[in-house]
Structures are given as C-alpha cells and as structure tokens.
Amino acid sequence: MERTTKVLTVDPESPDSEVLDRAAEAIREGKLVAFPTETVYGLGADALSSSAVEQIFRAKGRPATNPLIVHVADVEQARELSASWPAAAQRLADKFWPGPLTMVVRRSEIVSDTVCAGLETVALRMPAHPVARALIRRAERPVAAPSANRYTEVSPTTADHVLRGLDGRIDVVVDAGPTSVGLESTLVSVVDNPVEILRPGMIGRRVLAGVVDVEEASRVVVDETQTRPSPGMSKRHYSPAVSMRIVESAEFQRLRKRGEKTTGFIGFVEAFGDADEAVIAMPSTPRDYARRLYGVLHDLEERGVDEIVVEEPPDGDEWTAIRDRLRRAVG
Ligand code: TXA
Ligand code: MG
C-alpha cells in the first residue's frame, strides 16, 4: 500500500480555504487524510464508506474488532448517526461540544458495521480544532478517525509524529502544528444511566459529574480477538517501543543520580545538574504535562534510549488521564 503522502501546511487558527478544500476533496474521494484535532492528530476517512474505513484499519495495522470514533461538525449530524439521543447526551453536548469528549450512543442504520466493528453503538465526537471543524464541514459527511499512529504506538501530537508512523501509508497529512490538549478525548457511554467513563481524558470525572450522573467503567481487559465492550482498554496501547516504568519520587532521584546515559528520565525536577539530554523536566500542572507527554515519549524513542523511567505524577482527578496513559504505556 505504498502511497505518496502529501503534507499540506495550514495556519491552525485561520486555515487556508483552498488547502482545506483539497483535503476535504481527498476525503470525499475515499482517501486517508490525517488532520489535527485539539487532542491528537486523527487519521480521517469518509465514515459512510466501508472501503475508505477499511483502509484506516489497514494503514494503522489495527484489528477490525476495535471500532473507530466518528467525527461530526454539529449536534444535528451526531443525531443522524444515533438511533436515540438521550437527555444525558444533549446535556454533555451542550456543555462540552465542540471539545475533547466522545460519546458512545446507539447507532442508526446509516452507520456501517465496519466503522463500529459490528457493535450496536457508535462513538461520536465533535472536535473543537478549527482545522478539524472546517474539514468535516467541507467534506460534507462524518469523518471516521482514530489517532493517526500505527496500532499500539504512541499517539501523534504533531504532523511529524504522524509521518514517522504512517508516511507512505496515507494520502495526506494536514499540518497545523502541535495539538493543545495532547491526550485523547474522554470517552463516555451514554447508552445507559449513569453515564460510564470508558477512557479517562482531560475532561475529568468531577467536571462530568457536574453535568450528569457518572461512574467509572470496570477495568476489564479483553483479548484482541473480541470486539471489546469498553474499548480503549486493551492492555498495550499508547506504548512506546522502549520499555518504561513508573517509580516514586525517592526512587526516581536515586536512579537519575546513577545517571545511566541510555535511560530516559521524565520527572518534575527543574535542574538535573549537568546537561543530560535524556533527562526531561515536566510541567507541574496537569494541563501542561498532558500537552507535552506524547511529544516527550516520541523524542525519547527517537533518541534511542533503552529504557524510560517516569516519576509518578500526583493523585487526584486532574491527573487521572495522565496516570492512565502512563500505565498503559508501561503495559
Ligand atoms: O481524541 C480522540 O479521541 C482522538 C482524536 C483523533 O479524535 N481519537 C482517538 O481514536 O483516540 P482511537 O481510535 O485511537 O480511540 C478510540 C477509542 C478506542 O479505544 C475504541 O475502542 C473506542 O474509542 N470506541 C470506538 N467506538 C466505540 C464504541 N462503539 N463503544 C465503545 N468504545 C468505542
Ligand atoms: Mg489510538
């Protein structure tokens, strides 16, 4: 499936409409177009075309049992894809759309089996990024898009990350610079009451609970051969190619003082003494930490470290998604 991947560069705030038209046309032609959302870059294709959607699975090397998120331009489009639109969905949409929240609802007949892996439900998201919004609107159809990385690899927060994994396997990448949230959207099921968190994200549990009744999904880990009821839960997901561990602060300090050059350190300390390129000081706020995390993992991979040691982040609702992604990266 060798292709020539075109890079189309746009301004993130006011993207050039000719460029957007080209990207939207590629989607309408059934091609694969990676584009920025506020969370991570997505690998987009026409959600109403089974053959286009099949190509997403092929390019990523993703099992056909793992359903995709369908991105919409507005609530009306979301409702067309839904068999029912619960009151909780409307409340969440009013509060968090456009934004980094994905809602699983019962699907209508226009949604193909391919995109939702045969489930009776579909995951819907209305992204806030101006490029994503304009692209979906111009494509004049919903856009299926998982994160634009190879299966089990770290999600991309820049077009460069996308190309590292998918160059030659996709048709277009729209480059609008780094994404702002940095972690994948919060994924909730609104099929039943209370709303269930299937994948934590930067819209945290406490914030959701201010709008609807909400509970954490039980952490079932299913094997790759089944369609998972609560996806995003496969054990090895978001993993860097390098082995990784999370340690408490005291242990982190001890390990970094030993200063193994082949180890990448990700911690909170400001200064590490002599400049060791593989030592990275992370921001102390969850928002900034999340924005940087995947870029740091990609960089350390590129540097060819043997191991990554991460200083354990704090407890608390705002750190839940970060802790979740770190745990998954450890596998
Ligand atoms: O921020 C995001 O959500 C990014 C951007 C591109 O929008 N997308 C993303 O897609 O992270 P992906 O495919 O990497 O993760 C989607 C998650 C997967 O864990 C998938 O199993 C789950 O959503 N999912 C999709 N459809 C589902 C459904 N009907 N029921 C439950 N989970 C579903
Ligand atoms: Mg993904």
Image (cartoon, grey):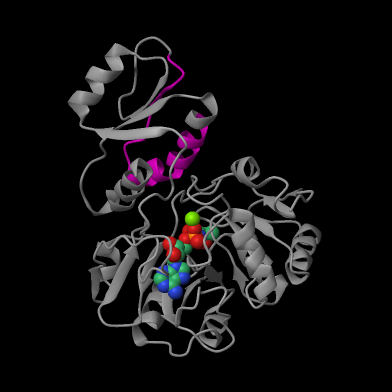
Q: Nearer the viewer, residue 286 or 165?
A: 165
Relative to 99, say whether 317 is above or below. above
Q: Specify whether 52 is left or right of 294.
A: right
Q: Residue at x 50, y 73 (%)?
A: 117
Give the quadrant of residue 331. Answer: top left
Residue reaching furthest left?
A: 250
Q: Residue at x 34, y 62 (%)?
A: 222
Q: Residue at x 48, y 65 (%)?
A: 66
The answer to whether residue 25 is seen in the rendering is yes
Residue 311 appearing in the image: no
Magenta-tinted stretch: 276-299
Q: Is residue 66 left or right of residue 72?
A: left
Where residue 22 appears, as percent x and y from the top left, is: 80, 61
Question: What residue is shown at x 31% (from left), y 67% (from top)?
Answer: 197
280 falls in the magenta region: yes
Give the side of residue 5 with respect to residue 114, left or right: right
